[in-house]
């Protein structure tokens, strides 16, 4: 429900991007999938280098 609520706000307020600070978590992965579905850029922030590799393997474009 949290991920859906984020995208409800994004659509309602007509944002073109979302910053995801929980990128490697289950919630973060849901946000990534919904970003693709709704064509919203998701900027993902992670703490460790191995999390970058994990997200890249999922096809994520923006990882910091």
Image (tube, rainbow, N blue to C red):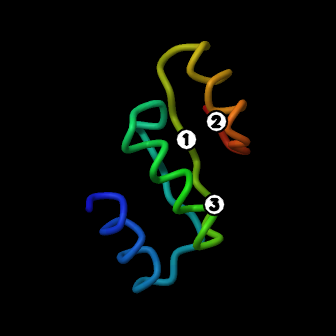
* Closer to us: 10 or 57: 57
Location of residue 51 (image quadrant) = top right
Quarter holding the N terminus is: bottom left
- Return the disc, 3 or 2, that comes first in the chain's sequence: 3
Residue 3 percent across, percent down from the top left: 36, 59
Q: Count every numbered label the image shows and give the total.
A: 3
Location of residue 9 (image quadrant) = bottom left
Residue 64 is labelled as none
Residue 15 percent across, percent down from the top left: 52, 75
Q: Residues within 10 Å of mark 3 (few under 14, many from 20)?
A: some
- Return the disc, 2 or 1, that comes first in the chain's sequence: 1
Residue ID at (64%, 62%) = 36
The residue to which callout 3 is attached is 41
Residue at the far left in the pictured view: 1
Residue 59 percent across, percent down from the top left: 73, 42
- Whether pointer 2 and pointer 1 mark residues with C-beta atoms closer than 8 Å, the reply is yes
Per the model, the C-alpha gap separating discs 3 and 1 is: 10 Å
SS class, disc 1: strand
Looking at the image, residue 25 sits to the left or right of residue 48; the answer is: left
SS class, disc 3: strand
Per the model, the C-alpha gap separating discs 2 and 1 is: 5 Å
Residue ID at (47%, 53%) = 31
Residue ID at (57%, 62%) = 35
Looking at the image, residue 56 sits to the left or right of residue 26; the answer is: right
The residue to which callout 2 is attached is 63
Q: In this view, does 44 lie above or below 54?
A: below
Per the model, the C-alpha gap separating discs 3 and 2 is: 11 Å
Residue 44 is labelled as 1
* Closer to us: 60 or 17: 60
């Amino acid at each position: 429900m949290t991920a859906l609520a984020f995208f409800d706000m994004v659509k309602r307020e007509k944002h073109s991007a979302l910053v995801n600070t929980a990128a490697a978590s289950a919630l973060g992965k849901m946000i990534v999938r919904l970003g693709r579905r709704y064509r919203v850029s998701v900027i993902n922030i992670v703490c460790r280098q191995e999390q970058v590799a994990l997200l890249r393997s999922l096809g994520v474009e923006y990882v910091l």
